[in-house]
C-alpha cells in the first residue's frame, strides 16, 4: 500500500499514541485489536513468505477483552496506562491457558494455568494480549528456530534471521503485530533481535523485571504462584 496509508495505520504508531487514542475516543480498543489481527493474518505464518513471529494466537480472548475495555471506558473506567493496547509476549512467559514450552523437550503439552508476574502486570495496566512469539530451544540461541513452531524470519529480509532468543518478539514489533512486547534477556536476547529488526529493545537491570513464570526459570521462585510475589 502507499506510504501514506502505512503512516496512518494505528498498528505502526507508538504504544503511547495508541493508548492516548483509546482514552480520547479517537479509536476503540476493538478496532485496534482488529487492525493488529488483520496484519498478523496477512503477514505472519510458518509458510514461505511469512514472518512466523506470533506462533500462539489468542484472538478470541483478545476480541472479548477489547469489547470489555471499550465498555469500561464508556462507563468512565480506565484500567490503566495501557488500556486497550494490543501486546504480544515471548512464548517463554506463562499466560493463562496458552502453551508455554520454551521449545524444551517434554513440555510440548504444557499449558500455563496462571500468568507470569510481568504478564499479569501488563494486563493489570489494561493491555490486551494477542498471543505469544517464537523462541529457540531453551531460549538459548541468537536465532529463533523452534521444532514446535518453525523458524522465525527477519521482516526486512525473509532469508535472514530476526535474531534470538526474543526473535519472534522483535519481529512482531517491527511488523506492527503488537504495540508492545514482553521479552527476556541475559546475554543479548532482547538487544540483538531489536538491532537485527530495527526496533527499540530495552534490557532492565537484573531483578527489576521479575522472572516468575518464565521458562527456563532462573531460580526457585520462578514457578511460585503470582499472588505470593506481589
Image: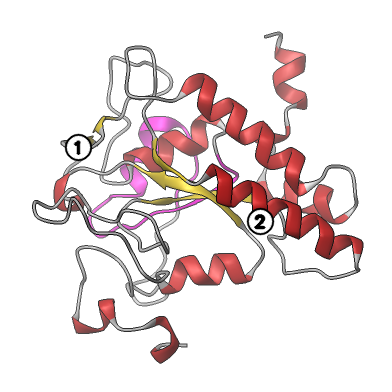
Whether residue 12 is visible: no
**Image side of residue 154 versus residue 101, left or right:** right
Q: Quadrant of residue 141?
A: top left
Name the residue tied to disc 2. Answer: 65
- Mark number for residue 33? none
Q: Which residues are magenta?
A: 178-201
Find out whether residue 199 is within the magenta segment.
yes
Q: Is residue 1 above or below residue 127?
A: above
Confirm or deny contact between disc 1 and disc 2 (CB under 8 A): no
Residue at image position (28%, 50%) is 189
**Image side of residue 219 versus residue 40, left or right:** left
Pinpoint residue 131: horizontal percent, then vertical percent: 47, 46
Which residue is more in the foreground, 198 or 169?
A: 169
Of circles 1 and 2, the one toward us is: 2
Residue at image position (40%, 60%) is 97
Identify the image quadrant of the N terminus: top right
Q: Is residue 137 above or below residue 225?
A: above
Find out whether residue 93 is within the magenta segment.
no
Pinpoint residue 27: horizontal percent, then vertical percent: 84, 42
Name the residue tied to disc 1. Answer: 146
Amino acid at each position: 500500500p502507499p506510504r501514506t496509508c502505512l503512516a496512518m495505520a494505528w498498528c505502526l504508531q507508538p504504544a503511547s499514541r495508541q493508548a492516548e487514542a483509546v482514552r480520547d475516543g479517537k479509536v476503540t480498543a476493538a478496532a485496534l485489536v482488529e487492525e493488529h489481527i488483520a496484519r498478523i493474518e496477512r503477514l505472519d505464518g510458518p509458510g514461505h513468505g511469512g514472518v512466523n513471529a506470533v506462533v500462539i494466537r489468542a484472538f478470541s480472548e483478545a476480541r472479548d477483552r477489547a469489547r470489555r475495555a471499550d465498555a469500561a471506558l464508556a462507563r468512565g473506567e480506565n484500567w490503566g496506562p495501557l488500556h486497550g493496547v494490543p501486546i504480544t509476549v515471548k512464548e517463554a512467559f506463562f499466560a493463562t491457558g496458552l502453551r508455554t514450552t520454551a521449545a524444551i523437550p517434554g513440555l510440548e503439552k504444557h499449558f500455563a494455568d496462571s500468568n507470569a508476574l510481568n504478564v499479569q502486570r501488563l494486563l493489570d495496566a489494561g493491555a490486551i494480549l494477542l498471543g505469544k512469539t517464537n523462541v529457540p530451544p531453551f531460549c538459548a540461541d541468537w536465532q529463533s528456530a523452534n521444532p514446535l513452531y518453525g523458524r522465525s524470519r527477519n521482516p526486512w529480509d525473509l532469508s535472514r534471521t530476526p535474531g534470538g532468543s526474543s526473535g519472534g518478539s522483535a519481529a512482531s514489533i517491527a511488523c506492527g503485530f503488537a504495540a508492545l512486547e514482553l521479552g527476556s534477556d541475559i546475554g543479548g536476547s532482547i538487544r540483538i533481535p531489536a538491532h537485527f529488526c530495527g526496533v527499540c529493545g530495552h534490557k532492565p537491570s537484573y531483578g527489576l523485571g521479575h522472572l516468575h513464570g518464565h521458562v527456563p526459570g532462573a531460580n526457585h521462585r520462578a514457578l511460585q504462584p503470582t499472588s505470593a510475589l506481589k
